[in-house]
Image (cartoon, rainbow, N blue to C red):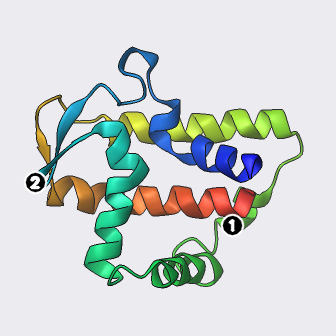
Amino acid sequence: LFLSHFMGDVHQPMHVGFTTDEGGNTINLRWFRHKSNLHHVWDREIILTALSDYYDKDVSLLLQDIERNITDGMWADDVTSWEHCNDLSHCVNNWAKESIQVACKWGYEGVQSGMTLSDEYFDSRMPFVMKRIAQGGIRL
């Protein structure tokens, strides 16, 4: 259980975010109509919104979609590079670097405390959240 939790954490971009804002936890904002923070948006809100908007709140449908994208969809050509790891400590560092790059380019970009994030943020960030879930699963 610890290993699967750790793999999820290292692939969640805000978990390797900045200590000054506690990985987005101190960036208070609104997610559509309710209060949240940037860390929570990446931990949960984007996934729950995708579940509601695209999968009728059925997690198994979301997982089937991720699996389909791994086996013969948009990530099929990338899976081999995700699996490759000769030195675990080096790989973990690389996975964390991937996450901070996503956090900087897609997580923090254009976000300020007090603002409302909605469709534009969700639509442009959701593919990265799903890809990180897929990468974490493959690497686990």
Amino acid tagged 1: Val
User: Where is residue 18 drawn, in percent x and y?
Assistant: 44, 22
Determine the residue positioned at 55% across, 60% down.
Answer: 133
The amino acid at mark 2 is Arg
Residue 10, image quadrant: top right
Task: Return the disc, 1 or 2, that comes first in the chain's sequence.
Answer: 2
Q: Nearer the viewer, residue 11 or 87?
A: 11
Left or right: 15 in relation to 120: right
- Nearer to us in this view, 27 or 135: 27
Q: Which residue is the site of mark 2? A: 33
Instruction: For the residues labelled 1 and 2, say whether their Cβ atoms are less than 8 Å apart.
Output: no
List x then y, in percent, for residue 48: 34, 64
| Residue lying at 64% horizontally and 65% vertically, measured from the top left | 78
In the displayed structure, 117 sits above or below 27; it is: below
Query: In the figure, is residue 62 to the left or right of 138?
Result: left
Local secondary structure at mark 1 = helix
Instruction: Say which of marks 1 and 2 sits in front.
Output: 2
Q: Please state if 74 lies on the left or on the right of 84 as rendered.
A: left
* Cα–Cα span, label 1 and label 2: 37 Å
What is the quadrant of residue 109 in the picture?
A: top left
Name above or below for residue 16 compared with residue 22.
below
Q: Which mark is residue 79?
A: 1
Residue 7: image location, x then y, percent? 67, 48
